[in-house]
Image (cartoon, rainbow, N blue to C red):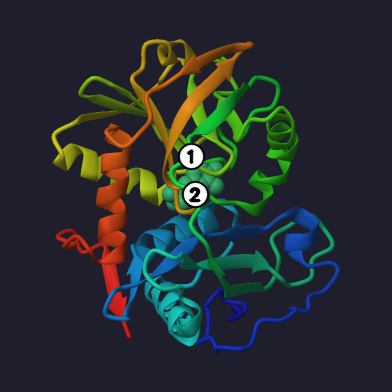
Amino acid sequence: MTSSKDGHFAKGQLSPFGDIKMSPSAGVLNYGQGLFEGTKAYRKENGNILLFRPDQNAIRMKIGAERMCMPSPSIDQFIDAVKQTALANKRWVPPPGKGTLYMRPLLMGTGPILGVAPAPEYTFLIYASPVGNYFKEGFAPLNLLVEDDYARASRGGAGGVKAISNYAPVFNAMKRAKGRGYSDALYLDSANKKNLEEASSCNIFVIKGNLISTPATNGTILPGITRRSIIEIARDSGYKVEERDIPVDELVGADEVFCTGTAVVVAPVGSITYKDKRIEFKVGAQSVSRQLYSTLVGIQMGHIEDTKGWTIEIN
Ligand code: PMP
């Protein structure tokens, strides 16, 4: 769907996957005026489809749109578009446990603009693709490399929203970490290079005893929907959860570390390497992160009763 000049988005339509056309002077191509989201549709045992908290993606996109000076579809328009996309692609939602249908909402300035300024027109669309489980051969732990040259975001920047322009600047750090055999880079705060922030596309949690800590959302890390859901599940399970600054030094002596995100769900971290020192953490079937993973996936797949109203069942 495309916005009119007053920023109102008219009712959208379904169309087969294909190329889109825009002016070479589109705002998104020239000035990076774009946002994306990621959400999944899950197949229930009864054949119906479950969506997980699409309202949270809608709200995050709305906040991001304000930050990037763009109009956004209403929360209802966004949720309806996710539902329509999932239903139209129902046959592509894999059977339970075999994967999910990943949906990628995009909001971008498609109107032409030559001078540095917001685009005159915007497009909102969602495309979809079936995806397999992140861990194809069991629950393999991530090994992260602390990055101290490149920052993912800085205070006052756009790290707190899902701007398309946040991602290419960390490709070098990701490439370097992967080239050295690590799963991903782990970023520190840009001001002091002292506190943990997040990995390239997931949030991080540190467990010590009954305390589960995760970096506070102070505008530099993305407020993950999985992150927020895990905070609630952990508190319900009796853990103390703190959102705070976590100095990288605190990793020494931590019991467990895990990452959260729509793609990785809850992924155990086996090791973090900082200044050539490798710190290892507990992983395995008895770990807290595995319990949290099971509860979250149980709700997403409809095996565990959703007492929180997080899922929407459609058919
Ligand atoms: N941080 C970053 C930088 C991300 O790109 C993502 C993925 N959206 C996350 C964290 C996790 O967010 P969510 O749980 O909403 O997928």
Disc 2 residue: CB within 8 Å of ligand 1:
no
**Residue 89 percent location from the top left of the image:** 50, 82
Please state which amino acid type lies under the numbered disc 1. Answer: Ala
Is residue 302 left or right of 121 when viewed as pictured? left
Q: Nearer the viewer, residue 229 or 160?
A: 229
Q: Nearer the viewer, residue 45 or 250?
A: 45
Mark before the other along the chain sequence, 1 or 2: 2
Q: Which residue shows up at 72% across the image and 55% down it?
A: 32
Is residue 218 left or right of 71 when viewed as pictured? left
Q: Residues within 10 Å of mark 2 (few under 14, many from 20)?
A: few
Residue 44, located in which quarter of the rendered image?
bottom left
Disc 1 residue: CB within 8 Å of ligand 1:
no
**Residue 6 percent location from the top left of the image:** 57, 76
Label pair 1/2, CB-CB below 8 angstroms: yes
Checking the image for residue 263, the label placed there is none
Q: Nearer the viewer, residue 226 or 29?
A: 226
Residue 236 versus residue 299 in the image, above or below: above
Checking the image for residue 140, the label placed there is 1
* Residue 153 visible in the displayed image: no
Q: Spatial distance from mark 1 to mark 2, Cα to Cα?
A: 6 Å
Q: Quadrant of the C terminus?
A: bottom left
Q: Which residue is mark 2?
A: 135
| Callout 1: SS | loop
Residue 46 versus residue 234 in the image, above or below: below
Q: Quadrant of the N terminus?
A: bottom right
